[in-house]
Image (tube, rainbow, N blue to C red):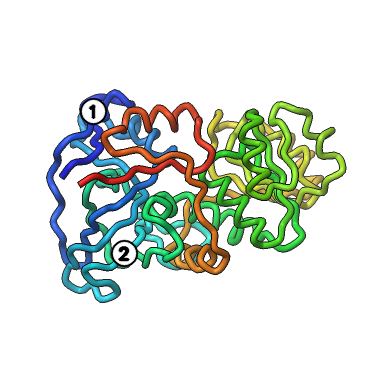
Amino acid sequence: MKAIVHEGKEGLNGLSYRDIYELETTPGNVKVKLKAAGMNRRDIAVTSRHKPDQPALVLGSDGAGVITEVGAGVTNVKTGDEVVINPGLGWKENSDAPPQGFEIMGFPDHGTFGEYVVVPGDHVEAKPAHLSWEEAGVLPLAALTAYRVIFTRGKVKKGDTVLLPGIGSGVLTFALKFAKALGARVIVTSRSEEKLEAAKKLGADRAINTQSDWNNELQDEQIDLVVESIGRATFNKSLGVVRKGGTIVTFGATTEDEVEIDIRKFFYGQYNLLGSTMGSAEEFKEMLEFITANDIKPELDRVFKLSQYKEAFEYLRDTKNFGKIGFTVEG
């Protein structure tokens, strides 16, 4: 089969689009002929985590397609079913944190940037009927991450005010849509005026420049939850505007990982700081039900062919996207 493969060199220079063997369908697993796949910043990180001396790796965590083979013991799906893939392996029930052994598709094992993929039978769910193949293909990782951030960790409710610094990523565009569907007030920040305008069209109540003085800009707001995914560049600005007793949920860091905080200010303010990453299979099913009930679709920025992998990876690396980036799968 044709696939985007990483091998031989660290970083994006190790990528190619070539023929590679198809995996066999073993008991408990299903084979999916992929129609579309989605990119995440994780895919860029994997090109550095996957070392030149390791075997060739098919990248990709997100995907949707049609089941072509069903392994022994799988009863929840059949050949011909249209499915989306849950990329979080080994986390079934909702819990405080992922269990030991939790992995994400696309590293260390093969992922979805190819014509076929073999996955556990209990990690596919019916494709929501209101989504196109491209929308379904980019949905899983970002929507699941946003769902856990907004619902499980952030516990957002109607009337809350949510701040989303650095709007534009797939996760944050889902977080915006989920929070608005709950009846929350949403404020976003970005350095890009174009992205601020796009966010307002999606329902953001206010949009401010990331490099502005947030304390001045937001002095009339009571912010209940901040969703932090930038890191050092904005963390203390976020801590400076969340209400006393409010919550920061962080799921990533696009700038430096390490931050310094005034711990005395933190404990006097009675703040809550929560980490989050991905989500369980239980939350994945809940997320699919929620987007179906509320007719929510991914914000699809651009779709590439697998053979356009170089342009796609550079586009995501340079943060040109507003929303999700997808691949259509040829063949």
Task: Provide residue 44's location: percent of width, then percent of height.
Answer: 39, 33
Quadrant of residue 213 within the rendered picture: top right
Closer to the chain start, of discs 1 and 2, is: 1
**In the image, is residue 291 above or below residue 75?**
above
Residue 198 picture quarter = top right
Q: Which quadrant of the view contains residue 147?
A: bottom right
> Of 156 and 270, which appears nearest the observer?
156
- The residue where tag 1 is placed is 52
Horizontal placement of 261 versus 330: left or right? right
How far apart marks 1 and 2 lie (CA) works out to 35 Å
Point out which mark residue 236 bears.
none
Side (left or right) of 219 relative to 65: right
Nearest the eye: 28 or 125: 125
Q: Secondary structure at mark 1?
A: loop
Residue 314's x, y, as percent?
A: 40, 27
Q: Residue at x 26, y 34 (%)?
A: 307
Residue at the image position 36 percent from the left and 59 percent from the top = 84
Residue 302 in the image: x percent, y percent?
44, 39
Which residue was labeled with disc 2? 82
Q: Residues within 10 Å of mark 2 (few under 14, many from 20)?
A: many
What residue is at 41 percent from the left and 49 percent from the top?
138
Amino acid type at image mark 1: Pro
Left or right of 244 in this view: 191: left
